[in-house]
Amino acid sequence: MDEPREPGKSTQESSAKHEKAQRDAVQRNRMALFDDAFWAKSGHQRSVLALLAKRLFDIVVSLAAIILLSPVLLIVALLIKLESRGPMIFHQLRVGKYNIPFTMLKFRSMRIGAEYNKQALMVSNEMDGPVFKIRDDPRVTRVGRFIRRWSLDELPQLFNVLRGDMSVVGPRPLPVVEVADMREDQMRRHSVKPGLTCIWQISGRNEISFDEWIQLDLIYVDNASFALDLEIFFRTFRAVLKRKGSY
């Protein structure tokens, strides 16, 4: 006679196997992005000097980008204004370092009132976990679809970086309503400043699961260094040009 199984034991074992599969998948992704030698020299550097170097890098890059891309910023803003009524910049409360909320800036890519229509579209959500994303979102305008495809809608976040709310490299900031549904062990991603780009950004973005996304963020947190930031920063240009996983 088989021994009686504990209630819920089968579910726990299934969940454990799923989590192990996710960790293994993320590990393969991690090693595919960077070789062993890179991870060996990418130590966990959190000294005052390292933090100052990161902040200086953020200021220089964001300020230079704002100046160089100012014509692009003006053109995108004008196109948004010409296509539909409403503000050019979309303000949204996102979760920053130490779970402190801040107002993140984006070029508006949706019609006015899009946030109120989100609930009706939840059945079409293509992401797992608390994140909401669909490929052909009917709320997105024609200009919005174009600027999203090339990540131009994210450019106003350069001002968030300059202001100190964000960093050039770090886990992407999530809306407050989505973070509220995250598990406690996933919240460790908020121990560093959120960023414009991260490992997730160069790994396929919306093509990977939410759990993999968070695991990649935690890998960044555990291996944070200036060398890793530079590597992710330069690889981001290639990822944007390929437009993989962007919608």
Image: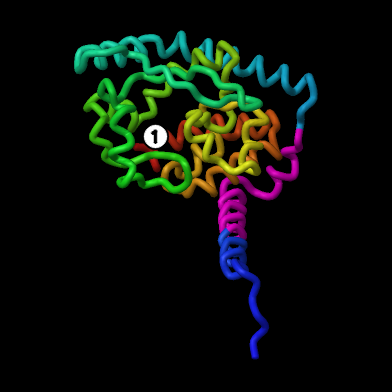
Queried whether the magenta region covers residue 119, the answer comes back as no
> Where does the image place residue 90, in percent across and percent down from the top left?
37, 18
Pinpoint residue 195: horizontal percent, then vertical percent: 55, 27
Q: Nearer the viewer, residue 6 or 49?
A: 6
Classify 169 as above or below 102: below
Image position of 151 with respect to 49: above or below: below
Question: Where are the magenta residues, as a range?
Answer: 19-44
Q: Is residue 24 left or right of residue 74?
A: right
- Disc 1, SS: helix
- Choose between 31 and 103: the one closer to the eye: 103
- Which quadrant, please, contains the C terminus? top left
Q: Is residue 43 magenta?
A: yes
The three-letter amino acid code for the residue at tag 1 is Leu
Q: Which residue is mark 1?
A: 241
The residue sitting at 57% across, 21% down in the picture is 166
Task: Work out whether residue 192 or residue 148 is closer to the camera in this orientation and state it.
Answer: 192
